[in-house]
Amino acid sequence: MIIRGVDITNFRNIARATIAFSPSFNLIEGRNAQGKTNLLEAIYLFCLGRSFRTRSLDEAVRFGEEYFFVKIAGTSDSGVDFEMEAAYEREGRARVSINGKRAAGFADAVGVIPGVIFVPEDILLASGPPAGRRAYLDYTAAQISLMFLRDIKEYRLVLRQRNALLERAARDCAQPEGIEAWDEAVAAKGAAIVRMRLETIGEIARRAEKFFGEIVGEPGGFRMEYACSFSPTLKEPETELREALARAREAERRRGYTMAGPHYDDVRIFLEGAELRRYGSQGRKRLAALVLKLAQALAILERRGERPVVMLDDIFSELDRDTAARVREHLTGGYQSFITTPRANEPGVPGDAAARFAIEAGSVSPIA
Ligand SMILES: Nc1ncnc2c1ncn2[C@@H]1O[C@H](COP(=O)(O)OP(=O)(O)OP(=O)(O)O)[C@@H](O)[C@H]1O
Ligand SMILES: [Mg+2]
């Protein structure tokens, strides 16, 4: 996948920008608070189906303006050109179109441009709460296979409907009528999610282990395992989830939401035998997060046969020289990349960027 260019109007501090990108490295230079992350955020909207920074797109509308507009033009690895547009008015819904045809929303754009982003806060993948690791896994799954994407959407839908029923029942101090049918649906879709996540971990783990071994210079140090909240053995997730829901029945009726399911699961990461979240150093956590992203990119590429675009938001300054050089090596594996930095010519930043851009107060200009 190659992003040929973007057109941006009123997105955060970017009033107007029309940018044509290089199919290989794109280096975006600018001092702090000039709009580097804003530019990546605008592009990545189409990969993730929402902003990676906020739940409310209102925040992304330029101060004093009423709407933003982002258009992206790309070419798939098989040579098919496409265009996507998103227009968002304050307090409204995003209007998204793909090749001129109106889509239901951003969610429909997910999967068109496979993308991998690495921002400094991604260290939370290793040390933060489970939600971040679930999101990482589900996003990877969705980028690998459209079938996985469908599983995720269906699970969210049944969960939402079951929660709505429980919430009404809790509010009215009544029995949730017909909950058994939703138990069945949550158990079936929940088990599908678990299977999908296990398969995805399988895809990621062996690649991550290889990257980790290459970077630290010793093989065998990286391990990942799925920690299922309702099925420790992972033998019969569907039956076990049905039983867990039955056990939670009374508590759910009082609290008004679903209390068992893969939305409580986690992924455990072990480095050199010890659980990373508890025992890992800062540097190892950062490295593990990075390795997870490299593995994500490679899994998407190999499973889907489409190169993801890679975005690195000012990460080289946080890595030591050797690690930065190795990361750089892996990224020359043919991905189109977008790399931001507050310093030109810093070590580890590809000096031979095929295209360089300067960004100042939201205005982007190519550097010859
Ligand atoms: N909705 C908005 N409208 C206008 N300006 C905004 C909006 N949201 C954020 N900004 C401005 O964008 C700037 C920050 O941009 P961004 O986060 O892209 O900086 P950056 O270049 O990545 O900086 P750093 O190197 O510190 O990460 C700030 O000056 C902020 O005030
Ligand atoms: Mg930034």
Image: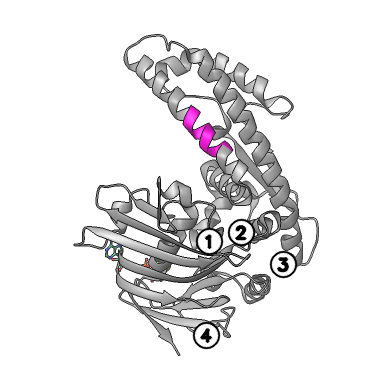
Left or right: where 245 falls relative to 256 = right
The Cα–Cα distance between marks 1 and 3, rounded to whole angstroms, is 19 Å
Establish if 115 lies above or below 225: below
Select label 1 or label 3 by which is in front. Answer: 1
Task: Look at the image and tell me whether residue 348 can be seen.
Answer: yes
Residue type indicated by callout 3: Ile
Identify the mark nearer the N-term, 2 or 1.
1
For the residue carrying disc 4, how many other residues have a C-alpha within 10 Å: few (<14), some (14-19), or many (20+)?
few
Residue 345 is labelled as 4
Identify the mark nearer the N-term, 3 or 2.
3
Q: Which residues are magenta?
A: 151-158
- Answer yes or no: do the residues labelled 3 and 2 have beta carbons within 8 Å? no
Q: Identify the residue shown where x is 37% and y is 69%.
A: 7
Confirm or reject: label 1 Cβ below 8 Å from ligand 2: no
Q: Main secondary structure of the magenta part?
A: helix
Name the colour scheme: one colour
SS of the residue under disc 4: loop
* Residue hosting label 2: 293
Image position, residue 138 (x, y; %):
57, 44
For the residue carrying disc 1, how many other residues have a C-alpha within 10 Å: few (<14), some (14-19), or many (20+)?
many
The Cα–Cα distance between marks 2 and 4, rounded to whole angstroms, is 24 Å
Select label 3 or label 2 by which is in front. Answer: 2
* Residue hosting label 1: 117
* Residue hosting label 3: 215
SS of the residue under disc 2: helix
Q: Identify the residue shown where x is 19% and y is 62%.
A: 64
Name the residue nearer the viewer: 258 or 47: 47
Residue type indicated by callout 2: Lys
* Quarter containing the C terminus: bottom left
Residue type indicated by callout 1: Ile
